[in-house]
Image: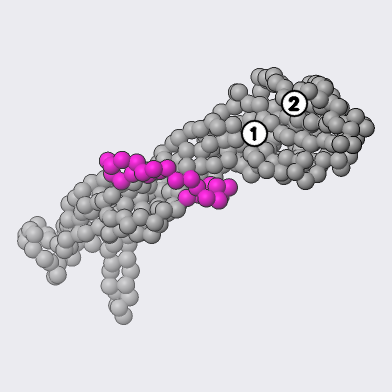
């Protein structure tokens, strides 16, 4: 009955200036300022820009006795940025063998992906608009009068160059993709999945980042499973006089032929190496390693080599 009642409302809009640590609000210049009487409790503000801008909106409420209370909220205007990929960063299966360019997994443990700094929004890469924001310089805006929750809290928005979440889905061979799973601890930019894999299987994983404004992008990687070693048949050695027969005693300087048949039903034969040894006096053994060929994705391969001693 004795309160003086609300007299007026005023809204001021100021830019948030990005920095590498704590962002500041430019209170020296108002982008917009609107004052209305107590009968108006809603207003429309038109904020447009040809580049992303972070704004601070301060609402000041004044009663007839000239008491003042302020609160503020933050808003991001972005109609131009987008997600892209970095050509110098890696998006690969860390659980796969490095010797196969991370495409073949040779164990049955978790399938793991990493895409550290591969996806990014270039504008937020160059402008750290989502860092924490300095407190009100006059100390008048505290508690719930400050923006302490939502997507743009005063404490800052955790992000990876503008990206605030990742989703992952996968499929086996030619089957359908699973439903998307949101990546926990998304700042790590990694994902591991325990799957009962079998030799010969192929998995495709999609990773879909989403940035602060809702832009999205999708890219996939493929991993092949082969945990079994190659197989080769018994080594055979022969000379010209006794073809295809095992030879143990030979004449000096007599040329020999050696042969094995090797195969791998899942990943194929990549390379074949022959190692030849010579036994000297006192059981001294010397060996020589020779690579005779490289064969990628071959189901089976018969290898022969001539031996001269």
Highlighted magenta segment, given as a residue range: 169-191
Q: Left of 232 or right of it: where is 84?
A: right
- Residue 42 in the image: above or below residue 204: above
* Residue in view at x 45 percent, y 53 percent: 192
Which is in the foreground here, disc 1 or disc 2? 2
Q: Is residue 301 visible?
A: no
Among numbered discs 1 and 2, the one appearing first in the sequence:
2
For disc 2, the marked residue is: 41
Badge 2: residue crowd in 10 Å (few <14, some 14–19, many ≥20):
few
Read off the residue under disc 1.
124
In what element is the residue under mark 2? Answer: loop
The image shows residue 201 at horizontal and vertical percentages of 28, 49
In the structure shown, which secondary structural element does the residue marked by tag 1 occupy?
helix
Extreme right residue here? 65
Q: Residues within 10 Å of mark 1 (few under 14, many from 20)?
A: many
Rendering colour mode = one colour
Residue 33 percent location from the top left of the image: 81, 22
């Amino acid at each position: 009955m004795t309160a003086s009642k609300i007299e007026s409302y005023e809204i001021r809009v100021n830019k948030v200036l990005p920095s590498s640590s704590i962002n500041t609000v430019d209170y020296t210049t108002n982008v917009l300022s609107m004052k209305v009487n107590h009968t108006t409790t809603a207003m429309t503000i038109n904020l447009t820009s040809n580049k992303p801008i972070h704004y601070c909106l301060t609402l000041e409420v004044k009663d007839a006795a000239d008491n003042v209370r302020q609160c503020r909220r933050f808003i991001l205007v972005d109609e131009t940025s987008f997600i892209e990929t970095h050509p110098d960063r890696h998006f690969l299966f860390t659980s796969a063998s490095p010797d196969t360019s991370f495409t073949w997994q040779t164990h049955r443990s978790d399938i793991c992906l990493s895409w550290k700094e591969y996806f990014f929004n270039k504008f937020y890469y160059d402008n750290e608009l989502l860092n924490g924001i300095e407190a009100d310089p006059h100390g008048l805006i505290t508690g719930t009068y400050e923006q302490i929750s939502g997507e743009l809290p005063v404490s800052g928005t955790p992000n990876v160059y503008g990206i605030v979440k990742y989703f992952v889905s996968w499929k086996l061979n030619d089957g359908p993709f699973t439903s998307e799973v949101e990546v926990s601890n998304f700042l790590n930019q990694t994902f591991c999945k325990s799957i009962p894999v079998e030799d010969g299987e192929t998995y495709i994983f999609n990773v879909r980042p989403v940035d602060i404004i809702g832009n999205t992008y999708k890219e996939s990687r493929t991993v092949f499973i082969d945990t079994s070693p190659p197989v080769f048949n018994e080594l055979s050695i022969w000379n010209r006089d006794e073809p295809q027969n095992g030879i143990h005693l030979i004449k000096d300087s007599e040329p020999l032929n050696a042969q094995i048949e090797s195969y791998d039903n899942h990943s194929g034969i990549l390379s074949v190496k022959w190692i030849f040894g010579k036994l000297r006096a006192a059981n001294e053994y010397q060996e020589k390693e020779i690579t005779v060929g490289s064969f990628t994705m071959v189901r089976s391969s018969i290898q022969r080599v001539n031996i001269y001693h």
